[in-house]
Image: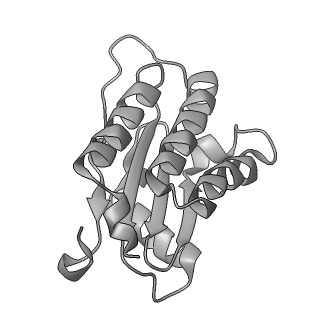
Amino acid sequence: MNFWEEFTDEHKAGIKRAIEVAEMNTSGEIRVHLENSCKTDLFDRAADIFAKLEMHKTKLRNGILFYVAVNDRKFAIIGDVGINQKVPTGFWDETKEAVLNYFRMNQIPEGLMEGIRMAGEQLKEQFPYEMGDVDELTNEISYGSREDEI
C-alpha cells in the first residue's frame, strides 16, 4: 500500500482546518511537513525542516512542527524553545504516542489531526490568544522535494 494514498484532498483540508482551529485561541504556530522518506537521522531531519520553514522566527518562539516521512513510517514532533520551556514533563511523549496509535491503524491523517488538537490545547494554555495576534506562519502543509510530493 502506498501511504501517500492516505492523504486525500479531504484529509489535507482536514489537517489544515485542524491547524486553524488549534491556532484560534493561541499565539502559537503549528506546521505539518510530509515527505516520502527520511534518509538521515529522524530528529536531525525534522530540525532541518523546522529551520527551513523559519519556525524559529516566531515572536514568542512557540512553533510546533509535525514531521512525517510517510513511506518510512517515521514521525517526529519538534517544539521551539518557548513552548518547550512551558509544556508539562512528558507532554511531547504523550502527544507522540497518541498520534502513533492512529498511525498503527494506518490512519495517518487522523493521527496528525489528533496531535494538532493536543498541541493546540497546550498552546492555548501556555500562550493564550492576545488581541492583535498575527498568524506568523502559513497553515498549509509543506512537502518534501519534487519527487517526494503527494
Q: Can residue 62 be seen in this snapshot?
A: no
Q: Residue at x 34, y 56 (%)?
A: 54
Q: Residue at x 60, y 41 (%)?
A: 83
Check the picture and name the quadrant holding the N terminus: bottom left
Check the picture and name the quadrant holding the C terminus: bottom left
Q: Residue at x 63, y 23 (%)?
A: 125
Q: Nearer the viewer, residue 41 or 62?
A: 41
Looking at the image, what colour scheme do you see? Answer: one colour
Q: Nearer the viewer, residue 54 or 20?
A: 20
Q: Residue at x 67, y 55 (%)?
A: 101
Q: Position of residue 111 (x, y in %)?
A: 54, 49
Q: Can residue 12 be seen in this snapshot?
A: yes
In the rendered image, the vertical position of residue 74 relative to residue 100, given as above or below: below
Report the number of numbered marks: 0
Q: Is residue 141 left or right of residue 107?
A: left
Q: Nearer the viewer, residue 72 or 76?
A: 72
From this viewpoint, which residue is outermost toward the bottom? 39
